[in-house]
Image (cartoon, helix red, strand yellow):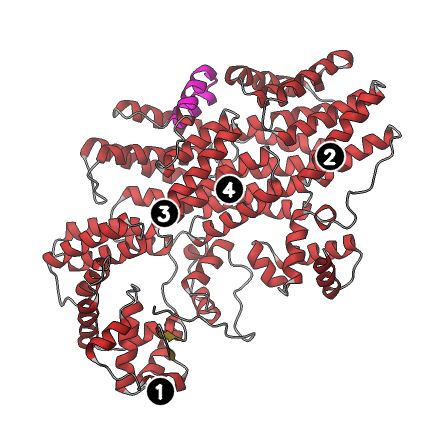
């Protein structure tokens, strides 16, 4: 197998500037194939729009490539011919045919010694390994058109194995001297084969070459749109943007805006495209099933409406679907009905959508099924649907959809009390979102990570991630992540006893308009707002908020929502009446899945029982809550339970397991400690966790303080013993 090396160039490599947005930084490193010198050159040439992630990044570092071309040109002709053959076999499509080509033509490979001496490439049992991808590109681009054509024809001739026809067609197309309908048709068919096999990167290269060989301008535009779609599904957002720029496909433009642009613009473009597909038939990104495409575009428009939190756009999309005769995704009609207060209609529409979560299936529809289940309070169904969406996307080679599924999986993980495990999975999804150019999804995931940090007591991380999410979201009209980030800060305030600050944040959440807040987040935050308002003695607005929440809970009959409504009723009552409402809440929690909220209900109930001097039951409830919070890794809530127990005069054991690092450190501290013990620098840890080096330094100081140590050497020893 022919591969390409990518060695680390040592500590002298230039670093990327700290002012780069994280999504741009990650994509630059990917474009540069991890080469820091290439990345630094690319970063220095970015325009304002590229810096904000709106325009595609440059594809190549011209200065570095110019130096590499000169290096290759200095090699003997025989060496350069062998390097050209190896490069054509790897760039831009990896075809694994170099050794067969050498054998078929009895090429003398001894000239490769010169390349090895020069440090340009070296031979292995599997073929030629280049020093780095840019050397490989230089070896290809310095050759003449005639020499390139000859090696492509040679590689096409030896690619005769089973399943190799798409790559054979690629080399035949690369060897073409000019437009050819016959070769363009062959490349289109080969792309279809590759696409069916889930290899969208290969399909993109084949269709893009077919476009170059097509003599008709309209056909070229259509093929470029198809290539852009394949590039997007392969995770290459910058290539997709470059290709879309050569077409007038509003559907693809809307999709890219949905993932990295303004959500309102995305909604308008996607809804327009859905109407065109339904009424006028296929456009540049033609499909054999325009009605099916219209349904999918409407689903994407629904996602844009969800991102913005704009009720007017939800209504508009539902009206358009009705006018053009399309049954809209249940989430669209359900959102519109819920936001309008038609809760019975919303329940029926969302239940229908949530029911479409069987194994396999279309990832987009499965994600919508998960969203509907979340709104209904069925977090088990939401987790199932989003997991299946991610699995279905991976099976189809559509890795770009995986982080989209994780955006909504995070809610289910949060509510069911799995913050530590969910944090790791969400962090990986965040990295994938940045890598594939989905900065809007990354913003949503940042807000989810802020929520996990609030639960696990990582106050600095919560604030850093919430601020990053909110600043980006407000600039893009993303009401959903903006609202979730604000909720995370409010929850942090609530769990640390800053009740007035929490209530103020949650009141602000209710007041925000489209693009700044979100009714769904406002709704799920209602029980926490009621608690904060009661603690501050201002319950007028809280009672009205609870009445609406209770209406929804009774309509959808979700045990958890009904339990939280009963908890609100207990908070707003007093004496024996409050006790009965708490008992009702705990009975309902027993049939639900929100274990973390059940523990919070026990904490509040235990406090109420203590004040009523029901000492025995108060002690039992508080010990149960404490055990749950320790299990969930929520130190601030656990501290509140300990405080209540101490007021009771109950002996409280110290933080469990003095020798248990998991119990002594927060989730983020534990992750940082393990990376530091493995030898990673603060900057390296920051890059892997997508946080600032300042925050990593703060975490390490916290780790040392909690563990009673002073150095990384002691940390390595302690972790080794643990």
**Spatial separation of the CA atoms under disc 1 and disc 2:** 68 Å
Residue 497 versus residue 408: which sits nearer the camera? 408
Quick one: SS at disc 2?
helix
Residue 463 position, x and y percent, is: 64, 45
Q: Residue at x 35, y 33 (%)?
A: 299
**Spatial separation of the CA atoms under disc 3 and disc 2:** 41 Å
User: Does residue 679 appear left or right of residue 109 in this picture?
Assistant: right
Q: Residues within 10 Å of mark 3 (few under 14, many from 20)?
A: many
Q: Does the residue at mark 4 contact the one at mark 2 (Cβ under 8 Å)?
A: no
Q: According to the image, label 1 marks what residue?
A: 114
**Spatial separation of the CA atoms under disc 4 and disc 3:** 20 Å
Q: Does the residue at mark 1 contact the one at mark 4 (Cβ under 8 Å)?
A: no
Q: According to the image, label 4 marks what residue?
A: 444
The answer to which image quadrant residue 654 occupies is top right
Q: Does the residue at mark 4 contact the one at mark 3 (Cβ under 8 Å)?
A: no
Considering only vertical position in the picture, is 179 above or below 474?
below
The answer to which image quadrant residue 342 occupies is top left
Q: According to the image, label 2 marks what residue?
A: 627
Quick one: SS at disc 3?
loop
Residue 559 position, x and y percent, is: 57, 20
Task: Give the residues drawn in magenta, as a range.
Answer: 330-352
Residue 496 visible in rendering? no
Q: According to the image, label 3 marks what residue?
A: 398
User: Does residue 525 appear left or right of residue 145 in this picture?
Assistant: right
């Amino acid at each position: 197998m022919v591969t390409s090396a990518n060695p680390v160039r040592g500590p002298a490599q230039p670093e990327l500037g700290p002012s780069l947005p994280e999504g741009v930084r990650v994509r630059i490193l990917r474009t540069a194939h991890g080469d820091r010198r290439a990345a630094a050159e690319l970063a220095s040439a970015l325009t304002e729009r590229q810096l904000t992630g709106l325009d595609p990044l440059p594809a190549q570092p011209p200065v570095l490539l110019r130096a590499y071309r000169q290096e290759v040109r200095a090699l003997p002709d025989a060496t350069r011919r062998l390097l050209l053959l190896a490069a054509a076999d790897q760039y831009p499509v990896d075809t694994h045919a170099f050794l067969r080509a050498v054998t078929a033509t009895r090429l003398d490979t001894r000239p490769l010694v010169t390349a090895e001496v020069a440090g340009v490439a070296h031979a292995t049992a599997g073929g030629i390994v280049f020093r780095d991808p840019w050397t490989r590109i230089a070896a290809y681009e310095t050759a003449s058109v005639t020499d390139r054509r000859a090696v492509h024809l040679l590689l096409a001739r030896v690619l005769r194995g089973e399943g190799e026809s798409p790559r054979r067609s690629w080399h035949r197309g690369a060897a073409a001297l000019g437009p050819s309908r016959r070769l363009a048709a062959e490349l289109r068919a080969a792309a279809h084969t590759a696409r069916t096999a889930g290899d969208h990167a290969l399909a993109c290269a084949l269709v893009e070459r077919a476009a170059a060989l097509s003599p008709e301008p309209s056909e070229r535009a259509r093929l470029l749109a198809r290539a852009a779609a394949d590039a997007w599904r392969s995770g290459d957002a910058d290539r997709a943007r470059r290709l879309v720029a050569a077409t007038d496909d509003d559907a693809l433009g809307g999709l890219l805006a949905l993932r990295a642009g303004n959500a309102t613009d995305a909604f308008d473009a996607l809804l327009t495209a859905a109407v065109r597909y339904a009424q006028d038939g296929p456009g540049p990104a033609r499909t054999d099933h325009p009605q099916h495409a219209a349904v999918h575009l409407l689903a994407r428009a629904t996602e844009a409406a969800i991102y913005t939190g704009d009720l007017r756009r939800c209504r508009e999309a539902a009206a358009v679907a009705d006018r053009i005769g399309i049954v809209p995704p249940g989430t669209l009609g359900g959102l519109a009905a819920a936001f309008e207060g038609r809760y019975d209609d919303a329940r029926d529409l969302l239940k229908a959508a949530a029911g479409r979560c069987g194994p396999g299936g279309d990832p987009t529809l499965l994600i919508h099924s998960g969203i509907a289940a979340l709104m209904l309070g069925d977090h088990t169904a939401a987790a199932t649907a989003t997991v299946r969406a991610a699995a279905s996307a991976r099976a189809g080679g559509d890795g770009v959809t995986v982080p989209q599924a994780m955006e909504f999986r995070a809610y289910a993980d949060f509510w069911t009390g799995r913050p530590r495990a969910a944090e790791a999975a969400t962090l990986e999804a965040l990295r994938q979102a940045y890598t594939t150019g989905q900065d809007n999804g990354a913003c949503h995931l940042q807000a989810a990570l802020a929520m996990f940090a609030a639960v696990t007591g990582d106050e600095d991380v919560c604030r850093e991630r919430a601020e990053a999410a909110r600043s980006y979201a407000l600039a893009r009209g993303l009401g959903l992540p903006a609202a979730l980030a604000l909720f995370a800060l409010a929850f942090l305030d609530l769990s640390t006893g800053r009740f007035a600050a929490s209530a103020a944040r949650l009141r602000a959440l209710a007041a925000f308009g489209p693009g700044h807040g979100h009714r769904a987040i406002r709704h799920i935050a209602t029980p926490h707002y009621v608690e904060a308002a009661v603690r501050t003695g201002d319950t007028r607005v809280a009672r009205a908020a609870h009445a609406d929440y209770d209406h929804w809970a009774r309509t959808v009959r979700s045990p958890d929502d009904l339990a939280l409504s009963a908890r609100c009723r207990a908070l707003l009552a007093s004496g024996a009446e409050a006790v009965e409402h708490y008992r009702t809440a705990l009975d309902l929690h027993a049939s639900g899945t929100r274990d973390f909220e059940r523990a919070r209900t026990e904490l509040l109930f235990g406090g109420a029982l203590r004040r009523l001097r029901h000492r025995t039951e108060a002690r039992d409830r508080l010990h149960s809550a404490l055990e749950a919070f320790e299990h969930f890794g929520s130190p601030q809530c656990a501290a509140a339970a300990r405080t209540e127990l101490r007021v009771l005069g109950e002996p409280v054991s110290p933080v469990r397991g003095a020798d248990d690092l998991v119990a002594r450190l927060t989730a983020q501290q534990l992750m940082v400690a393990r990376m530091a013990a493995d030898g990673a620098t603060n900057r390296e840890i920051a890059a892997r966790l997508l946080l600032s080096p300042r925050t990593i330094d703060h975490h390490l100081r916290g780790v040392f303080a909690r563990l009673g140590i002073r150095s990384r050497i002691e940390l390595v020893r302690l972790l080794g013993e643990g």
